């Protein structure tokens, strides 16, 4: 009788183990490309050399940027006054933007989630000076 009870207990535990191990696995995490593409992103914060310049008057146009990165490698950035179209590629954590000019823009992806994106780049101005810009963007679609 004890052997029969022990047998049923072992059978029950085995069934529980098999059932637990066969449960649905979590959905795979989306890739950086999947998180970046097919959405519209808008700038929510602009840092220039560790200073928050989001609401400075000279940042008005930059604050209005809406960016879309398509899975075919093209992108569109729209502001209140113009539209830029180009191509993009992702190498590691670097987002490279190309608009048909000799200069590429290289932005380091500091953070990327379903709803937020943070990019940092050193921008070199025509007078040779440079500033480090960090852009925080949020998903608006």
Image: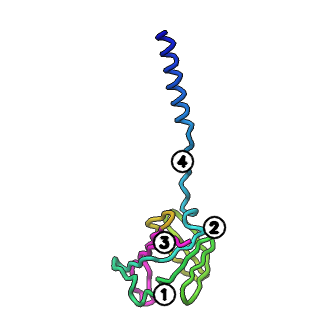
Give the spatial CA distance, label 1 vs label 2: 26 Å
Image location (x, y in percent) of residue 75: 60, 75
Which residue reaches farthest top? 1
What residue is rendered at 42% in x and 90% in y? Answer: 58
Q: Which residues are magenta?
A: 116-141
Residue at disc 1, secondary structure: helix
Question: Circle 4 — which element?
Answer: loop
Q: Which mark is residue 71?
A: 2
Determine if the magenta segment contains residue 48: no
Label 1 crowd (10 A; few <14 / some 14-19 / many >=20): few
Give the Cα distance between marks 2 and 4.
Answer: 24 Å
> Upstream in the sequence, badge 1 or badge 4?
4
Q: Could you say which quadrant of the image residue 55 lies in? A: bottom left
Disc 1 and disc 4: Cα gap in Å? 41 Å
* Residue denoted by label 4: 26
- The residue at which mark 3 appears reads as 138
Residue at x-position 42% and y-position 77%: 45
Quadrant in the rendering for residue 88: bottom right
CA distance separating discs 3 and 1: 17 Å
CA distance for labels 4 and 3:
25 Å
Q: Which mark is residue 49?
A: none
According to the picture, the residue beneath numbered tag 1 turns out to be 61
Mark positioned earlier in the residue sequence (1 or 2):
1
Q: CA distance from mark 3 to mark 2?
A: 18 Å
The residue under the point 41% across, 79% down is 46
Vertical placement of 114 versus 19: above or below? below
Badges 1 and 4: C-beta atoms under 8 Å apart? no
Residue 140 in magenta stretch:
yes
């Amino acid at each position: 009788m004890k052997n029969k009870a022990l047998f049923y207990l072992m059978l029950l535990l085995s069934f529980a183990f098999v059932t637990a191990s066969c449960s649905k696995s979590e959905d795979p995490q989306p890739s950086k490309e999947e998180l970046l593409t097919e959405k519209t992103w808008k700038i929510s914060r602009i840092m220039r050399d560790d200073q928050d310049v989001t609401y400075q008057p000279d940042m008005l146009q930059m604050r209005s940027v809406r960016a879309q990165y398509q899975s075919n490698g093209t992108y569109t950035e729209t502001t209140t006054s113009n539209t830029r179209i180009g191509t993009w590629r992702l190498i590691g954590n670097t987002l490279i933007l190309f608009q048909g000019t000799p200069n590429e823009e290289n932005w380091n992806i500091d953070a990327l989630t379903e709803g937020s994106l943070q990019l940092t780049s050193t921008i070199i101005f025509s007078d040779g000076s440079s500033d480090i810009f960090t852009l925080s963007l949020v998903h608006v679609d």
